[in-house]
Image (cartoon, helix red, strand yellow):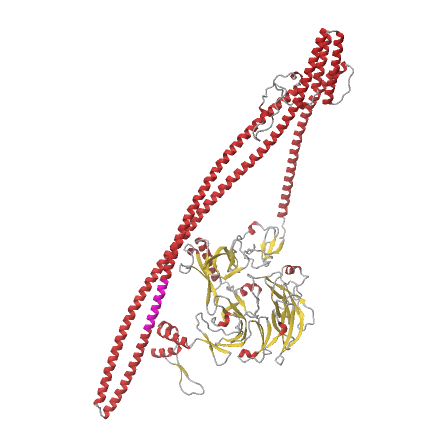
Amino acid sequence: MSRASSALFYFASLSLSLSLSRQPHTSLSLQPHASLSPPRSSTLSTPLSPPPSLSVSLSPLPHPLSPYLSRHHQQQLVESLDRLKSQTKELKEAHSQRKLALQEFSELSERMAELRSTKQRLSRQLRDKEEEMDAAVQKVDAMRQDIRKTEKARKELEAQLEDAKAEASKERKLRDHSEVYSKQLEMELETLKQQGSGRGAGGSSPELQQELSKVKSELDKKVLFYEEELVRREASHTSELKGLRKELHDSEGQQLSLHKELLMLKDKLEKAKRERQTETDEAVGALKDKYERERSMLTEDNRKLTTETDRLCTFVDKLTAQNRQLEDELQDLASKKESVAHWEAQIGQGLVQWDSSDEKDARGYLQALASKMTEELESLRSSSLGPRPLDPLWKVRRSQKLDMSARLELQSALDAEIRAKQLVQEELRKVKASNISFERSALTLLDRMFCVLISLFVCLQPKAHQLSIKTFSSPTQCTHCTSLMVGLIRQGYFCEVCSFICHVSCKDNAPQVCPIPPEQAKRPLGIDVQRGIGTAYKGFVRIPKPTGVKKGWQRAYAVVCDCKLFLYEVPEGKSTQPGVVTSQVLDLRDEEFSVSSVLASDVIHATRKDVPCIFRVTSSLLSSPAGAVSLLVLAESEAEKKKWMGVLESLQSILAKNRLRNRVVHVLHEAYDSSLPAIKSTLCAAIVDRERIALGTEEGLFVVEVTRDVIVRAADCKKVHQMELIPKEKMVALLCGRNRHVHLHPWGVLEGAEAAFDIKLTETKGCQALTTGVLRPGGPACLLAAIKRQVLCYEITRAKPHHRKLWEVQAPGVAQWLGMVRERLCVGYPSGFALLALQGESSPVSLVSPGDPSLAFLAQQPLDALHALEVGTAELLLCFSQLGIYVDPTGKRSRAQELMWPAMPLACSTSRFGFVLSEWLGVTHVSAPQLRPLNVEGSLNLLGSEQPRLIYFSNNSTEGDLAIPETSDNSKKLMVRTRSKRKFLFKVPEEERLQQRREMLRDPELRSKLISNPINFNHVAHMGPGDGMQVLMDLPLVSTAGAKMAASYCIHKP
């Protein structure tokens, strides 16, 4: 019985160990505890505190099932415990880091509070400074009021001085009157003496002697009285004048002291403002930087803490899930333990029954128990490993169990080998990936080196530039000649490969190798004095605003190039690059060009610190009367000012030494006195003959006789926009009125005669352009008018009805200009010109050929048409608003070079003496940016300065068409009516002329200026008759008295 019981117990233990050994590995992932039912409270109190389930003891305790656990499961359990320890440690460290971060955050909050208090303190200081500034401003206002009072006192003193002068003049007149009266009395006395002597010869009477003595005594008394009165008045006048002068001097001194004090206060105020502004800006900047830096640090720390908190939360969630899974497995193990204990109790009960009762009953009971245990084990095994067929034999089962345990050991070893192999494969994969990446990087490096070698090889090979025409948005220099790329668009060539820039004219002479060799890439600044091209100096300066220095300065970009000083305006705002439109150009070859420093009295509105940095550039404006224009320039510093002045003066001396030819073709003269009221409202003009100018103004048509100062009101029409003279038919065509109609007037209106007719061409309403021409050689004249796209042609004759409409034609576009070219009508429209036959029978010929690809940019960018003219026999020049183009009669480009405008032109005109391409800029540019042509020839222009002037352009090589009168800036001429309604005299009034003569006679200096110096007193005298010839001989010099008498006839008329 003992053997059977021991065998049965052994069988039961083997079955239990086999069933437990075949459980999944996850069921043994938690170490055994003293009790098999651990607490279920595994929730987290806070996301950063460790879970309560982790506070259990981690030391392995004895367990009834520990003998049944394999070594592998125990090792896994220990590893999980170690992981749990490390995770708990990491969680505690994260919690401590969070505490440190919170502590740092509190410290930063305290720091921010301190910074806010500092900011409030600075704000209070700023408020105090503003109050001080307000007090200073009030003081400045008080000083200004004092200055106004002194100015008022000075004006009152000046008025008193004028009154004293008037009284002195009255006394002087009284003295002159008394002198004249005394002379009359003396003359009467002489006559009385003569009469008395005559009478004495015949016989003297005592009555006459008494009367004579009485008259003498009265005369002596009056002379003494007048002399005493004159001395007394002169003494009083002198004393009053001295007192007034002293008071004036004192007031001026007080005003100067007040002005100086005001300037000092202004400087102090500006300095305090700047210092306060700089201090405030620095403090605010420092606070902003500190705040941004600390804010970025806090943001970064917060982001790190947030990511760390998220990671720990996810980790705690994973641990919670694992804990729940382990609790479920522990519950399963507890149930299994209860079943095993139940089995042990039943087996013990069976053994007790075996000992106490019948063997047969005990054996049956044990067999039933064994079968029941087998069923339960099979059910457990099926629940864990799935259904499995039963083995009928115990030995087979035991052998299978042994084989299974061996197989499990082999499988674990195989798994270990497989894991080791996988690790090795992973390492091999990483090494292979690193090798592949290294090979790829090496290949890319080799490819780059190969490309660099190829590029170097290609670069070493000589290659031509890839040049294309480009538009530059700021002043750019030519790489070849260092001159400016003058122009508004398409200024020059640009290489896409090496960024080489050059003029169109420099393309053939520039290096053709791309890229340019280093020794030729950068040329030094300088001007070729032989040709006058190149750039000498450039930089940013400041020039006065259009309203003057009082309104401030504006930035400009100055370039000394091609013997000229170019100035470009720099727009206000973020953009610091200047535009391509020049504001002023001054020629260094001008005889009147000069550079000089300024004094504080020259620029009274400039600040004291800017005065040492200001210099003046002067150049000529008019030839007659001699006029000059000056420009104030403010350099960045005093050293920069010295550089600018040194460059301009040295360059001017070099140009004068080398005698570089001044290529200016036009000479500017003032055509008439600028005080004439009609000049201010002049819209157009024409030269009638050498002594007459016709002016079309807002008020009508006027004719000025420049030599006789006669003004004729020719026509009363308003707003004369354009004027065309037709001398062949003795007609005048005017484009005038608000609706821009064409009117015809007889030639006699220019002479001052009443108009016999005023014909209004009604079809010409809204006329945009007007010109005249000849239908055929020797034929009648024609008048052509453009209304939008329609061009009307009228025949003009002297006979009535004086005009006849011939034809009308449609232009290719809206007409902007009309003119005669090659005996045909030329119409200018946006981006094009076309030739029309005067008879209108042929189709228009476009002067911009659509088949020329070099002119395709005109269609892409519409440009206003300004003018067209012939250049030579087979070439035309088309002038647009932004450039000029040379074409042949078929409309194809004839020259690669284009004409560049330095600024946007207002109008374009041609002179009858032509122009040369290389001298285009010198011909057209004048140092007056507000010059506007008044006629088609461009000989008469209006200079829009403070006082508008009528300017006449004359050629240096030929005699002009107009007699240039003498003018002055201080003319006091006025319009004086005559007997004719339409004629006026423009002269100085008689009262003003007499006043000028009196002032001249009083002032010896003025009188001496009006007397010419004697040159030669050799007189020619006739010595008597001869043989048909006069005998002449030189007489000796005349006496001094004769010289004075001869010189007295040379006084100029005032």
Q: Nearer the viewer, residue 1015 or 7?
A: 7
Q: Nearer the viewer, residue 852 or 610?
A: 610
The image quadrant that residue 179 belongs to is bottom left
Part of the protein shown in magenta: 150-168
Q: Nearer the viewer, residue 418 or 236?
A: 236
The image quadrant that residue 884 belongs to is bottom right
Where in the figure is residue 789, as x and y percent of width and height?
A: 65, 67
Residue 1014 seen in the current view: no
Compared to 133, does 918 lie above or below? below
Quadrant of the frame with the N terminus: top right
Where in the figure is residue 130, as x and y percent of width and height?
A: 42, 50
Identify the residue shown where x is 25% and y is 77%.
225
Identify the residue shown where x is 63% and y is 17%.
63
User: Magenta region, mostly helix, strand or loop?
Assistant: helix
Q: Is residue 157 magenta?
A: yes
Residue that sits furthest to the bottom in the current view: 202
Where in the figure is residue 811, as x and y percent of width and height?
A: 66, 68
Compared to 852, does 997 lie above or below? below
